[in-house]
Each structure stands twice: as C-alpha cells, then as structure tokens.
Amino acid sequence: MSLLKVTELGKSFGGVKAVDGISFDLAPGELLALIGPNGAGKSTTFNMVNGQLKADRGSILLDGEELVGRKPREIWRMGVGRTFQIAETFASLTVVENVQMALLSHDHKLFATWRRAADHKRDEALALLDQVGMKAQADRPCSVLAYGDVKRVELAIAMANSPKLLLMDEPTAGMAPKERNSLMALTKQLVIDRGMAVLFTEHSMDVVFAYADRMIVLARGRLIAQGKPLEIRDHPKVQEVYFGSGKTFEKIAEKAAAVNAAVAGEIA
Ligand code: ADP
Ligand code: MG
C-alpha cells in the first residue's frame, strides 16, 4: 500500500485555482520530486499535506488515515515531518540544544527552565547529529555555522519525530551546487536507512534528475506528467509547458547521470 495517497486535491484562492484536482501516490522509501514553474501550486500542495492549508476538495490519506481537516500539530504527530529554517531566536543555542528542543517537543515535555531541559535527550540528539554528520560541531552555536551545515542541523531537527514522510519545500534554495548535492545525498541516505519517504520541490534540475526516484510535474495547478526522471525528460508536454519550446532536458540529464553515478558509488 502506498504511504501517501492524494486524490483529486484542490484549493483556490479567490478566483485562482492554485491546485486543481491533483492525484498522486508516494511509497515508503521513495524520494518524489514535485516540480513546475513558479506559481504552479507546489507550496500550496505541501501546505495542504502538512495541514497549514485546508483543502477545498479531495483527500490526502496517510497510511489510510485522512489528513484533510486535521491540525498541523496532529499531522506532525502522525508522522509527517517538515524542514523549518532555524529561527533567529534559536540561533544562539548550540547545535545539540536545537535538536534537544525538537526531541522534547515531540515528547510533549515542557520544562520550567531550559537548564532542566538541557539535561534531557542529549544522547539522542547527538545520535541524530551523527547521522547528518554534525556531531563534531554539536556544541557550537548555530549562528556560527556555515550555511550548508545549518541545513544539516535543520534536517536533524526534522528527524526528531521520526517522520514516515518528510516534506522539503525548496530545501537547497540559496546553496552552492556542491552543498546542494551533499544535502540531497544525505537525504537519500536517510531515506535508505530509515525507509522514510520524501516529497520535495527543487529548482535545480541537476539535483532533481540525480536524486529523485520519481517526479510529478505541476503547471497552473494541474498535474501534467508523472514518472521516472527519464520518462519526464522525454515528455513533450513537460518540455513545452515547463521549459518553453526549443529547450530540452538533454544536457541536464547527461550531467545528472554523472552525478548520479558518483553518488551511487558514494552511498553503495
Ligand atoms: P509554487 O510553490 O509552485 O510557486 P504556490 O503554491 O505558492 O506555487 O502558488 C500557486 C498559486 O496560488 C499562485 O498563483 C499564487 O499566487 C497563489 N497563492 C498561493 N498562496 C496564496 C495565498 N495565500 N493567497 C492568495 N493566492 C495564493
Ligand atoms: Mg513554492
């Protein structure tokens, strides 16, 4: 059975059909890329899955349970995680403290003072940081980290509730190509290790072709294609709507194949 089953999902803002009746599935252990031009409805789709927006119509089943109508917190508890940017107020805390906070939040524990909270969950937090390659920097304040390292900590924070499904809306925005590849390789590793599913959006086609198991393509709120990266590459409707006539995926796909081979070697 699929982990996530989205059926005829729709949401309008005023007269704009931001998402117009889309259906797709996501299996455990699958990395699914949601692509499409700006305004295609990607973020709206994400926000319906995580409960921040209520769908006008359609259904979102997680392990057979309906998510539409539930609050974000409830959906999070059911196993849908998402990456957040570390808020400025938390940047002064250390790396490990940020992860501890996330773990405590999952356990519903509220502590009168941070000092008491700080004793808890340190080992568990360090284990998560180890998985994202940030254990050595555990006691540094987040504010002094390199951008790519902050993203790794954000990923560890998102892992704190052991999500079955992780949502990542433009996770590599603002990153250099090398950092992007490293973050996505890490994400892929987590998918493999934990059998977690990931739904992500991404502007860099290099990244999408290198890491996505499958892709779905939105244009003006409608799902115009879905399939494996190579099927999508050759899809005339995608080339036309998404890239405009004349441009093709050829070059990108070649480059991505090289990256893919390198990554496969790295994580095999
Ligand atoms: P994407 O993430 O693919 O760029 P969005 O889901 O953000 O696209 O937006 C899809 C469409 O819905 C756009 O036309 C956008 O202007 C509109 N939209 C998104 N959020 C809102 C909102 N809160 N209020 C009004 N219109 C919105
Ligand atoms: Mg968006």
Image (cartoon, grey):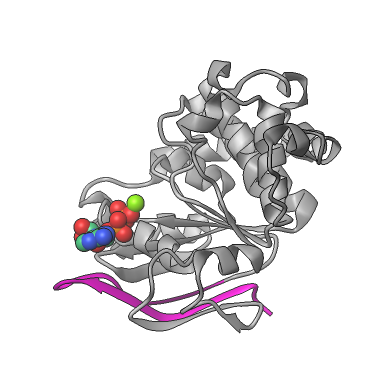
Residue 63, x across and y down, in percent: 66, 77
Hey, which residue is sitting farthest front in the picture? 112
Find ligand 1 in the image and state its quadrant: bottom left
Q: State the residue at coordinates (58%, 19%).
A: 145
- Magenta stretch, residue numbers: 1-25
- Vertical placement of 78 versus 142: above or below? below
The dominant secondary structure in magenta is strand
Q: Nearer the viewer, residue 150 or 175?
A: 150
Residue 10 shown left or right of residue 150 in the figure:
left
Q: Is residue 125 magenta?
A: no
Quadrant placement of the N terminus: bottom right
Residue 268 shown left or right of residue 147 in the figure:
right
Q: State the residue at coordinates (42%, 68%).
A: 48
Residue 228, x across and y down, in percent: 53, 60
Hey, which residue is sitting farthest left in the picture? 15
Residue 21, x across and y down, in percent: 34, 79
Quadrant placement of the C terminus: top right
Q: Nearer the viewer, residue 34 or 243?
A: 34
Residue 203 visible: yes
Residue 162, x across and y down, in percent: 72, 55
Q: Is residue 14 magenta?
A: yes
Q: State the residue at coordinates (38%, 62%).
A: 217
Q: Nearer the viewer, residue 98 or 254?
A: 98
- Vertical placement of 20 versus 243: above or below? below
